[in-house]
Image (cartoon, rainbow, N blue to C red):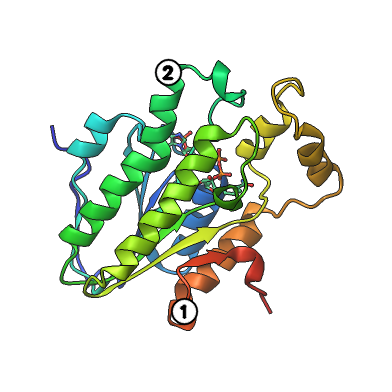
């Protein structure tokens, strides 16, 4: 079964974005901001709360590779297409010897295998169009955080994938991995809700929260949008939204 086939016309809308993980958090805030900025947005997640005439929700479990394999990206006639691989999970927060095989598989599938397949689909399907591809990475790619084995490993691999695709110089493609910093979402709530005996850095993350160091999803989305609008300015492929100063 092919899912997600929709066609949109360039006469109706000039800017189109496809975003995974629009059910909540950074993905939802980014989708809402892009809708405000006149984009037509396709959102891919398990749940949806966005209701907008220029938003199409495609229900999908991105940890299920058969659904990802069957996903047909929409035919888009506009000149520019943006894809944001945002959906991810922190996974089960446990020392590595306690990790269940099923969790390892689902976490790799959602955080790495699906984004990799979607990068390839995006580049091939929109070969004629100007493409901006953003993988949402994490500082955890460069920090071996105890009990975050699959999260750190998948984010590290996603950064490398981004760099390899960039080195290949695909036509009409700009690609970035963007690290959002620490953002006030369910992912951070999950981290703070872990028992200390399973997660030795718990107090560090509760302190980020109690010291009000978390970025709001609104500001994170605005900084991501700055990168989208000014992508020609950036020479590196791995970016942090902490480096973006909104005036
Ligand atoms: N928050 C932070 O501090 C932080 C820091 C560094 C990097 N990041 C990265 O930022 C991105 C967004 O994270 P977030 O903080 O916004 O997390 P979040 O609040 O947990 O949101 C995760 C998003 O992914 C979707 N999702 C989860 N499992 C899915 C599945 N199996 N299939 C389809 N969609 C799924 C969720 O929607 P549904 O539940 O509706 O499916 C939701 O929209 C992730 O790539 C994360 O690694 C976040």
Q: Quadrant of the N terminus?
A: top left
- The residue tagged 1 is 235
Q: Nearer the viewer, residue 225 or 133?
A: 133
**Label located before the other in sequence (1 or 2):** 2
Tell me the SS state at disc 2.
helix
Q: Quadrant of the C terminus?
A: bottom right
Is 11 placed above or below 210 here? below
Is 151 placed above or below 157 here? above
Is 185 placed above or below 173 here? above
> Horizontal placement of 69 versus 22: left or right?
left
User: Residue, x 71% and y 27% (percent of image)?
Assistant: 199
> Horizontal placement of 210 versus 93: left or right?
right
Residue at mark 2: C-beta within 8 A of ligand 1: no
Is 175 placed above or below 154 here? below
Q: Mark 1 packing: few (<14 Cα in 10 Å), some, or many (20+)?
A: few
Q: Which mark is residue 11?
A: none
- The residue tagged 2 is 101
> Horizontal placement of 220 versus 38: left or right?
right
Residue 60 rendering spot, x and y as whole percentages: 33, 34
Q: CA distance from mark 1 to mark 2?
A: 39 Å
């Amino acid at each position: 079964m092919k899912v997600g086939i929709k066609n949109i016309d360039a006469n109706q809308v000039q800017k189109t974005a496809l975003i995974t993980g629009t059910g909540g958090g950074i993905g939802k805030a980014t989708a809402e901001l892009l809708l405000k900025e006149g984009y037509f947005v396709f959102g891919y997640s398990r749940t949806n709360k966005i209701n907008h005439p220029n938003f199409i929700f495609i229900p999908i479990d991105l940890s299920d590779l058969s659904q990802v394999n069957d996903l047909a990206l929409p035919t888009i006639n506009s000149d520019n297409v943006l894809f944001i691989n945002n959906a991810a999970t922190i996974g089960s927060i446990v020392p590595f010897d306690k990790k269940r095989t099923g969790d390892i598989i689902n976490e790799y599938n959602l955080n790495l295998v699906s984004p990799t397949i979607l990068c390839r689909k995006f580049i091939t399907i929109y070969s004629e169009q100007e493409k901006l591809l953003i993988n949402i990475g994490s500082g955890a790619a460069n920090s071996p955080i105890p009990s975050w084995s699959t999260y750190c490993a998948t984010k590290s691999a996603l950064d490398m994938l981004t760099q390899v695709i960039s080195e290949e110089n695909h036509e009409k493609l700009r690609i970035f991995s963007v690290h959002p910093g620490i953002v006030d979402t369910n992912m951070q709530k999950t981290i703070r809700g872990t028992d200390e005996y399973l997660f030795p850095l718990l107090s560090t993350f509760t302190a980020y929260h109690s010291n009000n160091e978390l970025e709001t999803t609104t500001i994170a989305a605005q900084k991501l949008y700055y990168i989208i609008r000014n992508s020609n300015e950036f020479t590196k492929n791995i970016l942090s939204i902490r480096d973006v100063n909104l005036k």
